[in-house]
Amino acid sequence: MVVVRWNRDDVEHLVLSDSVLLLEGADGKATAVADDRLDRLPDEVQAKRAAVRSLPRGTPERAAAAAEYALAVEALRNAEGGFFTAAADPGVAGRAVTGRSGRAQVRTVAALTDGAARWSEVFRLGGWDDCVGLLHTEGAQRLIGRVRAAEAADPACTAFPRGKVRDDAAVIFADLTESG
């Protein structure tokens, strides 16, 4: 979840769970704001994820390992030492990553779901500066199209390991230099 609001003086943001916010500065450099708690799950849970990914898709062994991993992750949802998601409990919004920037220092904002953020985080098609540049020149639909093409090119998730072949992909891009 990403929430951004701005007025003539400030840009405030809130990021929770697996979405990413890109803040493009007046200098054209993008800063990614993310809630990294999903990346910091306990070693034993990360080992379960690695075990799932090491097994062939469609096998009973992988299904059993995936079920065990899912239970381990679920036990950490909205719990200390785990991660927080508003879908399970809107009251956890107070646990989000938050910040404020001066409006004059922010040129654009881009909110990306985890599926859209795959462009950089999973498929390594470019860095965050490149992502913002693509949004400027070609738009959000083109970014999502490139993610979909990368997903389709790796349906077994072997070249780019990930939990599922396709994921939700949405982008909101706002140019703050054009709004009051």
Image (tube, grey):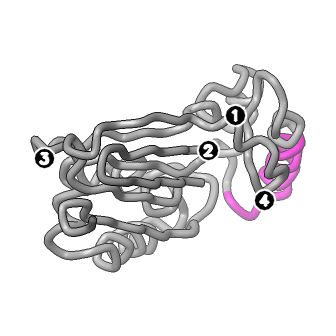
Neighbour tally class for label 4: few under 14, some 14-19, many 20 plus, Cα within 10 Å:
few
Q: Give the answer, above or below, for where 75 lies relative to 139.
A: above
Residue type at the position of mark 3: Gly
Q: Residue at x 52, y 56 (%)?
A: 114
Give the magenta range. Answer: 57-71
Q: Find disc 3 in the rendering and name its residue.
A: 28
The one of 53 and 75 positioned closer to us in this rendering? 75
Q: Find disc 2 in the rendering and name its residue.
A: 16
Residue 127, given in percent of the width and then of the height, sits at: 25, 46
Q: Magenta residues: mostly which secondary structure?
A: helix
Q: Give the answer, above or below, for where 154 lies relative to 87.
A: below
Residue type at the position of mark 2: Leu
Q: Give the answer, above or below, for where 138 lies relative to 131.
A: below
Q: Earlier in the sequence, mark 4 or mark 3?
A: 3
Residue type at the position of mark 4: Thr
Q: CA distance from mark 2 to mark 3?
A: 25 Å
Q: Is residue 122 visible to us here? A: yes
Q: Which mark is residue 59?
A: 4
Q: Earlier in the sequence, mark 1 or mark 4?
A: 4
Residue 142, given in percent of the width and then of the height, sits at: 28, 77
The one of 171 and 165 positioned closer to us in this rendering? 171
